[in-house]
Image (tube, coloured by chain):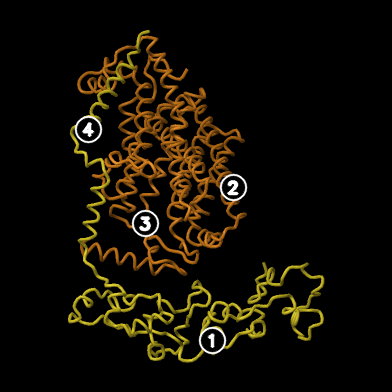
């Protein structure tokens, strides 16, 4: 570490030390898991949520959701490709990332991440996308010339069987992969919650409900993200939004929010009723450090308001444009709420002392590896990837190709 | 039965990937890449290469045995010498390099002894502006055996939080000794002789019982009020308004 870095670190710690209230231990002043660790569960959550939305079509035969099946799948893929990057950047040595596979450590949940990630990406997402698009790749390879034609040929793995039997096999395989994919998506994001829930020394994190709370909030953020992407793409392409589909997705979103809210409320009620020794400092944490991000952003703006909007949109007979706007606005607010939830878990858990007698502060940097700038770049990347993906892989089956779902 | 084309294609891809992985794992990459031992060894080497700044208490003891003995018997016995005097490895290996600093400013002692309500009960704390303002701590307190030059005149010297809480409550004028019997030895050797705590309801009944003579205090019938609970189970004696 050179002198400049030392100086910067010193200044930052001195600033944070000035904001400490009460009694803390010396090593608690530096917040170790910062903004990138907030971004990581947020992105992974969208992957799991978008995939589960897609699975409604394949496994549960929800016909109405069919128009956004492919979009949900591609959204999951675009976010999945970025999901590991916040961790790599946070650890600071991306060139060593392959070592997680070379020296597996089965007793560490964190060290197993590489395998969970690889399984989900390779065995679930890519396979499902391939089976969904295989017939279309073949058609597009025949219709397109030049580089793109060759690319589609490679993407189809030089397959050329579009017989009814082969298409039937694609559907069957796709359904089987989705059936495997649902518990895998639960594993992927339940795992993220498990990482926090299993830290028994931190009462803000240590809760068996944590994996399931993460999972439900993942479903909320994933569905909401697909609504946002679908609305924007329809707007850009000047296509009509399928309101039957959007209404159905809005209903699933509403149910998911209610379950998510119930679980989170249960978690808080349980903590308050148990009133363990940490309850007072956690009360201070919520009423001081996390008031804006938890009470205002996560609960009020990010949960109650969209809940009310979605419920209102269902109860009253409103016209299509208004309902579309309401779904879009509530989906945006839900992103704020879920991001707030990740923030409150990750940062909140490090803002109070293990002595239960003091509160710390987190000062986010604007530039650098672990900074707001980097977080914004990481949050923008999936959209760029998605923009490429939807150009490459059409979100609607081609004319002449039967829809894959049923 | 004919194997579907998809399975053949994916199987070939998978076999290719698998072959590449196995080739990398067993043929191309050296075996020590698959062990954590080289990482651990390299880390040990990195750590060992760092300069040593601290000498540790045993090194100080070799030359300063008298101070060490004084400190070992006093309230600062669990403090390392270098906590106050700074890293002294250079001084320990060659005393000619100069003496470690002797912190003498008041602010230095505030780090542990300035009043902070979250410090443990009984930990010696002062209000920097009220306690001998402007004087250096070491003029009255020997840092190696920090016994107060005279026994604290009142309980707030060590029990600041309780004193401050009580001062704002309706018990502000009640002396500590009204409820606690404090052995004389507690002032000089706090842990050797602890004050008593009221055992039964009668102690509170002296002021709050229906037959008490104190005029201002709220009265209750001790026989019927609060079943068999002790008073403190509902009323915090140092701030009775803070009733649970």
Q: What chain letter is assigned to the residue under label 1? A: B
User: Can you say whether A243 is above or below B100 in the image?
Assistant: above
Q: Tell me what hue chain A is rendered in.
A: orange
Q: Are marks 1 and 3 in contact (CB under 8 Å)?
A: no
Residue B153 drawn at (x, y percent): 54, 90
Residue closer to the observer: B64 or A194 = B64
Question: Which residue is tagged 2?
Answer: A266
Q: Are discs 1 and 3 both within one chain?
A: no
Q: Nearer the viewer, residue A311 or B40?
A: B40
Task: Give the colour of chain B.
Answer: yellow
Position of A218 relative to B104 (above/below):
above
Whole-angstrom CA distance, mark 1 to mark 2, is 50 Å
The outermost residue toward the top is B1
- Check contact, mark 2 vs mark 3: CB within 8 A: no
Residue A398: quadrant of the picture? top left
CA separation in Å, label 2 and label 4: 51 Å
From the viewer's perspective, is the residue at label 4 or at label 3 nearer?
4
**Residue in the image at 40% along x and 33% along y:** A235
Q: Are marks 2 and 3 on the same chain?
A: yes
User: In the picture, residue B83 is in which quadrant?
Assistant: bottom left
Point out residue A263 in the picture as x, y percentages from the top left corner: 56, 44
Q: Secondary structure at mark 3?
A: loop
Distance from Cα at disc 4 to Cα at disc 1: 74 Å
| Up-down relation of residue B66 to residue A399 (above or below) | below
Q: Which numbered marker is on residue B26?
A: 4
Which residue is tagged 1?
B187
Q: Disc 3 marks which residue?
A: A32
Crowdedness near tag 1: few (<14), some (14–19) or many (≥20) residues, C-alpha within 10 Å: many
Confirm whether circles 1 and 2 share one chain: no
Q: Residue at x 21, y 66 (%)?
A: B51
Label 4 vs 1, first from the N-terminus: 4
């Amino acid at each position: 570490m050179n002198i400049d870095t030392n100086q910067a670190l010193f200044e930052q710690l001195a600033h944070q030390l000035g904001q400490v209230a009460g009694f803390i231990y010396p090593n608690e002043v530096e917040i170790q898991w910062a903004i990138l660790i907030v971004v990581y569960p947020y992105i992974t959550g969208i992957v799991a949520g978008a995939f589960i939305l897609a699975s409604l079509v394949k496994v549960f035969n929800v016909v109405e959701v069919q128009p956004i099946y492919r979009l949900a799948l591609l959204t999951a893929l675009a976010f999945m490709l970025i999901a590991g990057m916040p961790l790599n950047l946070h650890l600071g040595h991306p060139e060593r990332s392959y070592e997680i596979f070379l020296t597996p450590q089965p007793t560490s949940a964190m060290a197993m991440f590489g395998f969970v990630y690889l399984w989900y990406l390779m065995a679930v997402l890519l396979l499902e996308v391939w089976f969904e698009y295989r017939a279309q790749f073949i058609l597009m390879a025949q219709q397109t010339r030049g580089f793109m034609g060759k690319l589609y040929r490679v993407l189809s793995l030089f397959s050329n069987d579009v017989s009814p039997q082969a298409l039937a096999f694609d559907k069957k395989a796709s359904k089987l992969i989705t059936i495997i994919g649902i518990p895998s998506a639960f594993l992927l994001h339940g795992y993220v919650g498990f990482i926090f829930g299993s830290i028994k020394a931190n009462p803000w994190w240590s809760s068996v409900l944590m994996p399931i709370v993460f999972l439900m909030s993942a479903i909320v953020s994933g569905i909401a993200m697909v609504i946002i992407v679908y609305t924007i793409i329809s707007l850009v392409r000047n296509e009509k939004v399928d309101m039957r589909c959007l209404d159905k997705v809005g209903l699933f979103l509403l149910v998911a929010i209610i379950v998510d809210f119930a679980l989170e409320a249960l978690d808080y009620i349980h903590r308050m009723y148990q009133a363990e020794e940490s309850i007072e400092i956690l009360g201070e944490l919520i009423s001081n450090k996390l008031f804006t991000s938890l009470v205002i952003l996560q609960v009020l703006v990010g949960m109650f308001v969209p809940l009310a909007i979605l419920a209102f949109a269902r109860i009253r007979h409103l016209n299509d444009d208004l309902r579309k706007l309401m779904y879009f606005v509530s989906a945006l607010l839900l992103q704020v709420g879920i991001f707030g939830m990740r923030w409150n878990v990750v940062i909140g858990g490090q803002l109070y002392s293990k002595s239960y007698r003091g509160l710390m502060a987190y000062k986010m940097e604007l530039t650098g590896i672990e900074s707001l700038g980097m977080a914004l770049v990481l949050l923008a990347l999936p959209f760029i990837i998605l923009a490429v993906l939807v150009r490459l892989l059409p979100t609607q089956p081609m004319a002449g190709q039967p829809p894959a779902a049923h | 039965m004919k194997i579907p084309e998809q399975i053949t294609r994916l199987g070939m891809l998978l076999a290719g990937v698998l072959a590449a992985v196995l080739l990398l794992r067993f043929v191309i990459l050296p075996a020590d890449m698959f062990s954590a031992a080289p990482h651990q060894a390299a880390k040990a080497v990195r750590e060992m290469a760092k300069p040593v700044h601290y000498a540790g208490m045993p090194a100080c003891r070799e030359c300063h045995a008298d101070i060490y003995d004084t400190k070992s018997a006093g309230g600062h016995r669990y403090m390392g010498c270098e906590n106050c005097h700074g890293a002294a490895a250079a001084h320990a290996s060659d005393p000619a390099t100069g003496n470690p600093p002797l912190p003498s400013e008041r602010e230095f002692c505030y780090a542990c002894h300035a009043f902070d309500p979250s410090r443990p009960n009984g930990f010696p704390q002062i209000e920097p502006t009220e306690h001998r303002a402007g004087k250096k701590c070491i003029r009255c307190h020997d840092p190696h055996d920090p016994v107060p030059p005279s026994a604290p005149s009142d309980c707030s010297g060590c029990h600041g939080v309780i004193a401050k809480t009580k001062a704002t409550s309706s018990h502000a004028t009640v002396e500590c000794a009204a409820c606690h019997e404090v052995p004389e030895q507690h002032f000089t050797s706090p842990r050797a002789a602890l004050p008593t705590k009221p055992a039964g309801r009668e102690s509170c009944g002296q002021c709050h019982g229906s037959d008490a003579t104190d005029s201002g205090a709220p009265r209750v019938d001790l026989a019927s009020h609060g079943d068999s609970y002790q008073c403190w189970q509902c009323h915090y004696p140092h701030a009775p308004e803070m009733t649970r």
